[in-house]
Structure formats: structure tokens, C-alpha cells
Image: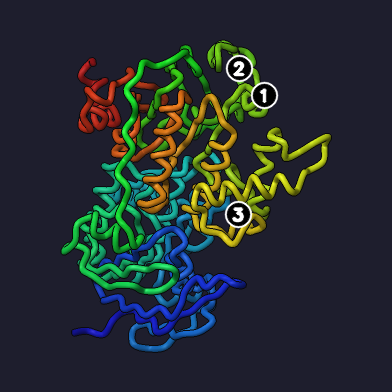
Amino acid sequence: MPAPLLSLRGLTKTYGTVRANRGIDLEVAQGSIHAILGENGAGKSTLMKLIYGVETPDAGEVIWQGNPVRLTSPAEARRQGIGMVFQHFSLFETLTVVENISLIVPGRKAELAARIRELGQEYGLEVEPRAHVHSLSVGERQRVEIIRCLMTDPRLLILDEPTSVLPPQSVTRLFQTLTRLRDRGVSILFISHKLEEIRSICDRATILRDGQVTGNIDPREHDAHDLAKMMIGRDMPAPRPAIAREPGEIRLELAGLDYRPDDPFAQSLSKISLRLHAGEILGIAGVSGNGQAELARLISGETTRPAAADEIRMMGKSVGHLGAAARRKLGFAFVPEERLGRGAVPEMSLADNSLLTAHRFGLVQRGLINRSREADFTARCIKDYDVRTPGPQAEAGALSGGNLQKFIVGREIMLAPKILFVSQPTWGVDIGAATAIRRRMVDLRNDGVAVLIISEEIEELFEICDRIQVIREGRLSPSLNVAETRVEDIGRYMIGAEERAGI
């Protein structure tokens, strides 16, 4: 047997009182796709940061191609032939795509732009090189990260949740790419909470729980249920069924909404119409970059439309001219797709992040913060939504992506909204947490809340939604009743086949 490309011996990392990694042993074979499985907070991302040189281990040894190495920075890791795509992106939002890539990949911008387009077409990761990153959706930003990593020609490619916001067609093409890379001798460390993906593409899987290795298996020899049980140490609860009921009054209505953004690379919206009733879940499906981000900002109030106020109505009132705070006073709550920066401030504690949207619920009185109530509110959110964190004073940026998502979703649900709008509710969230979040959505629906979900997880939409509409090139499809619709039907709308057929 050839020597492993990468070996870890007793790798340990501690942050204060939290032991993120405890004596990790791991071997990655040359030319293999190796999965790292574990719940949110199990230590997966920390381990990848140690391999990529972002963090330095407190103890243990990294052996690269048979020789001990000390990876003190990402630049050193890249020199060794290690590349990484992070779950939380490392892009400068005020720079263009090609400018971001030029910070790491040498070459003239015109040549890099041509290469970006070539890789995008080859791997199904199309993105406009001249677009500014701040104008891109989460899915498009992830494409930039993957392309940038591939352009460094790595020997070991680390992918942290690479398919979280990719549509099914792009996932298939990406997996074809990863298989070709493996066949050429590239090793891939693959973190994903999508267990069927791991079963379909990975040769080996290492399971982490509480920062320790608890198993090394061939994932193809186990079904998804077995993998989930090994990962979380217990059986998964069954999905909670929706209670059959007639929808209530209209809580949210978009009536022929048109929008042309100032950004030339953003997606215009045309004749967007939908109705969301109390006691139902409406899902919006679509390939990333087809207008989801623009639609979310218009509904949330981050972008206002004073000249066309009647195009957006909440609880029967025209709100197109109202900002986010005024809409929240009407009973609207929102979970954006970008956790850090929009959903939470990374440098602030969880307690202070609670103030961002819950200040009207007794946390601020006569202009002064009631620290006791702030701490109680945050502690209840942490407990009720199983947020793995030392406590309310932990910084939001220190949480794993899945735990931060659970906190933000929990914070918004605790506001007892009449309308809950969630964009990408389970992006990067492990199967246990994803199940819990979906159960909460169904509970809200059963309690009469109007729930709107934007998601690129088609299976998720079919599991919990009453109706689905597909957004493509800034237009919404007709409303489709989930009970009478197939996944293939949604896929046809996503690629425009229904429009070409004249349907």
C-alpha cells in the first residue's frame, strides 16, 4: 500500500475551556475522497483549519507525504499543495470576482477572467468575473471559492459543505469533477451533512463526536440511517406531519412586483406575484442567483419601494415603503441566508445579538438594556434550540455554522411572529439540527403562522411545504401544490423547460 498523503497523530486544539479536537488520528490516502462526519460543533471545521494552517495545534503532529510539517499559515499550506474551500467564505465583498482570485492566483486579470469562465463552464460553476462579490448570492460566492481553490492546482482539496447551496444539476457536475480529480491522484477531504452524497462519492469516512474520532468506515457499506446514528449517537426522530387544515387569511401578498436593481450584475425581478396564508408553508425553489437575494431584501424591508408601496402587503397593509423595523412591528420575522453580517454580528456576544431583533420584547426599557432579561432570553434560546455554546456571552463568530443557524432561527421564532421568512434554513446544518429546525417550521405552521421559505434543497421543500413556487431569471412560476407535484416537475421549472414548452 502506498504511504498516506496526509497523516495526523494526536492532534489537539483547545479554545479556553472548550476542547475542539482531542487527540485526533487520521490518515488520508492518495487519490481518495475522504469524508469527515459529525454534528455541528463536533470539531470538523477546527480540524480542517489545523490542516490548512489557519490554526496551530496545541499538541500532535501533521505528516505530509511522509514528512512531518508545521503548517503555520494558509500560504504555507498552499505551497505544500493543500487548498481549502471554507463554509464561511473568505472573500472581499468590495472587490470583483477576478480581483479576489488574483490575490492568491498569479496572472493578468484578463487571463484569470478567461480561466474563471472556462472552469465555470467545465464544472457547472458559472459566475461573472467582473461582478462585485457583494452583489452575488451565497451560492454564487461558493462557486467563486471553489473555482479559486481549483486554480491553485492542489494535491489535497478540503471542501467544507461544498454542496450546501448548489442546485442538483451543479452538484452532479461537481461530483463528476471531484471524481476526475481523484482519478488524477488528488485527495479530497469532504465535509457534508448530506449523507447520501457521502455514500455516493466517498471512499472512506471518519466520524467525529465531541472532538474525538469515534469511527473509521466505508460509507458505502452503511445506509443513511446508520450513518446518522453513528454521527449523533442516537436514533433520528421522525418528521412531524403537518395538520391538514384550510389556510387562513392572507398574511403576505406580492402583486406584480417589478424591480430593477442599480447593480448591473444583480437580477431584475418581473411581475412577481404570490400569496401566503396563515397556517401554511410556501417554499420558493430555484438555482442560486435567479433573484432570491433581491426578492428577500424586498420582502424583509432592506430594500424599499416607496413608488410602488402596494406591490407588497403584510397583514393587509401596504408596506413597500416601510423599512425592516416597521415591518417587524407588524409581526414579521426574518432569517437571512448570510448568518454572519446579516443574521448576527460575529464580534458581539449571543446575548447582544439577541438585542438586534428582540429589543422590543422587554430587553430594552426606557432606552436602557435590561441585562438580566437579555441573558434570560438568550439562555432560553440556547436551551430550547440546542445551541452548543459555553453560554450567552460567547461570541457569535466562535460558533460553528450550524449552531449559529440554530440560534438565529430560535431567536426569530421566540418573537412569536405572524409571518416567518427563512432563507436557506438548514444550509450547512447537520441532520439532527436540520430535522429539529424543520419540525419547528411545521409546528409554527400548525399554530397558524404564515411561513415563507427560500431553499435550494428540493427534498426539504417537499418535506415541509404545502405549496412551492420556482424562481427563474427573476420570475416566479405558478403555485404548485406539493401533494400533486413531482421533484421532476420542479426541476423542469428550474431549468426553464416548462416555459419553452409554453406551459
Q: Amino acid at mark 1?
A: Ala
Image spot of residue 117 (x, y percent)? 37, 47
Between marks 2 and 3 in the image, the one whose residue lies nearer the viewer: 3
**Do the residues bearing badges 2 and 3 touch, measured as CB atoms within 8 Å?**
no
Residue named by callout 1: 326
Residue on which disc 2 sits: 319
Up/down of 275 relative to 232, above or below:
above
Residue sitting at 29 percent across and 70 percent down?
187
- Compute the Cα span from label 3 to label 1: 26 Å
Report which quarter residue 198 is drawn in. Answer: bottom left
Q: Which residue is mark 3?
A: 396
Do the CB atoms of the residues marked 2 and 1 lie less than 8 Å apart? yes
Tell me which amino acid carries mark 3. Answer: Ala
Count neighbours of disc 2 (C-alpha within 10 A) and say few if under 14, some if 14 to 19, many if 20 or more.
many
Please, which residue is most extreme toward the bottom here?
A: 67
Foreground pick, 271 / 372: 372
Quick one: label 2 or label 3, which is nearer the N terminus?
Answer: 2
295 up-or-down from 349: above or below:
above
The kind of residue on which mark 2 rests is: Val
Q: Gap between marks 2 and 1, in whole Å?
A: 8 Å
On the question of residue 184 being in view, the answer is no
Q: Is residue 182 left or right of residue 258?
A: left
**Residue 49, percent across and down?**
48, 69
Residue shown at 30% from the left, 35% from the top = 463
Q: Earlier in the sequence, mark 2 or mark 1?
A: 2
Q: Is residue 341 above or below residue 192?
A: above
Whichever of callouts 3 and 1 sits on the residue coming sooner in the sequence is 1
Q: Position of residue 390 (x, y in %)?
A: 59, 62
